[in-house]
Image (cartoon, grey):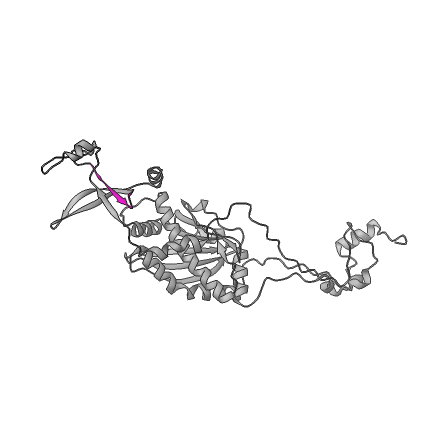
Amino acid sequence: MSDGALSQDEIDALLAGVDSSSLGGPMPSMPTAVAGGGEDDRRALQNFLSATVEAQSSNIAMMTGASASIRGPQVTFANRDNVLAQLPDMVTVVKVDFSSGFPGEHLYILPEATAKAIASLMNKEENIELDPMAMSVIGELVSQLVGTQITSLTDKTGNKSIASAAPEAANVPKAAAALPAGDFASAVYQLDLGDGNSHQIWEIFGPSVAGDIARALNGGGAAAMPSMGQMGGMDLGGMVGMPNMGGMPMMAGQPANVQSVQFPNLMPPRAGPQEAGNIGLIMDVSMEMTVELGRTRKLIKEILGMGEGTIIELDKLAGEPVDILVNHKLIAKGEVVVIDENFGVRVTEIVSPMERINEMG
C-alpha cells in the first residue's frame, strides 16, 4: 500500500472483517427495527388508549343514539397472520392514516355484523346494507374516534402537528384487508351497543406509528443512529488522510445523526379529523323538514280564479310515495300514516348520495 491505494486482497479482508482487530475491534451492526415492540411500548400504548375509552364511549353513544360503551383495549404486537386468524370472513376496514405528527399506517377493522349494527343505529334503519352511504356513516364515526385520540395525544406529547387523512371505508373479505407489513400494534376493543350481542373492534397502528407514539408517550424521541466517531472504538481522527472508497469523504469527529426524510405529499391535502369530525358540533342545529304530497303548475289566471271548494290535481298518483325534504333538498321517500289524530310519514326509502347530487344540480 506504498502508493496509498488498497490492494484487492486488503479490500477483501476489510469487507470480510478478517482484519477488524486492527481497526479497534469489531464493527457493530447498525440498529434496525426490532420485530415486535417492547413491553414498555406496549404498556404505553395500552395505557394511553385506555385513558380515552370514556370519551370514546360518549362519542359512540352520541352518534348511534344507543346506550353504547366501549371497553379495553388489549394491545399486542402482532403480524398479518395473527390478526387474520381472529377476524370473521367479511370485515369493514376503515383506513385513516396519520398524515403528520406520527405519520404512517393506521386503520380500524370491524366485523361486517358490527358495521351493520352501527350503521343501522346511526341511520335509524333496520336490515341495512353496507352501501356507500353506510360506509360514509361508519367513516364519520371513526373520524370522531380518531379526533379524540389526536386531542389526547397532543395534550400528552406536546406535538401540535398531529393530523390524519380522511377515513376511507370498505367492506371486503378479510384476506383483502390492507394490513401493515411486518409486526405492528393491534388494539382490540369490546363494544356494547345495547343489542345483547358481543362486538369487537380492532385498531391497527403501523410499526413506525406505534414506535413513534410509544416513545413520545414515554418522554423520548426517535432513536438516532450512532455517530461514526463512536463506532467500534474507531478513532476517525487517525483515519484522516486514508484514501476513501467509493469517493465518499471521511470526516474526523463529525457526528452522523441519521433521520428518515419526510417527503411532501404529492396528492392534494384532504380534510383531517378536526375538519371531518366537526359534524359533531352541529348535531343540535335545527333544520326544516317538509313532506311534499305533490306539485302542479298553474297559470296566474287559474290561481286568481281559485276559491273555496276548488280541487287542485297534483302530479302524483294515489298511493305513490311522498317526498321528504330537508331544507328543500330531497333526502327520502315515505308513505303517509295516521298516528292518533295526527298525520305522519313512514320512511320507506333513503335517497342515494348520487341522486342527492343530481337533485342539487
Image vertical order of residue 291 relative to residue 10, above or below:
above
Quadrant where the image shows the C terminus: top left
**Camera-side residue: 41 or 57?**
57
Q: Quadrant of residue 280?
A: bottom left
- Does 302 sit left or right of 240 as displayed? left
**Camera-side residue: 303 or 161?**
303
Image point (80%, 52%), residue name:
11
Locate residue 169, reporting x and y percent.
41, 47
**Camera-side residue: 71 or 247?**
247
Image point (55%, 56%), residue name:
208
Residue at the far right in the pictured view:
2
Residue 45 seen:
no
Was residue 321 drawn as part of the magenta stretch in this picture?
Answer: yes
Image point (75%, 65%), residue name:
233
- Does 347 sit left or right of 18 as displayed? left
Locate residue 18, reporting x and y percent.
77, 57
In this rendering, the count of numbered labels is 0
Locate residue 339, reporting x and y percent.
14, 49
Was residue 98 drawn as part of the magenta stretch in this picture?
Answer: no
Locate residue 144, reporting x and y percent.
40, 56
Residue 77 seen:
yes
Q: In this picture, which residue range is highlighted in magenta?
A: 320-329
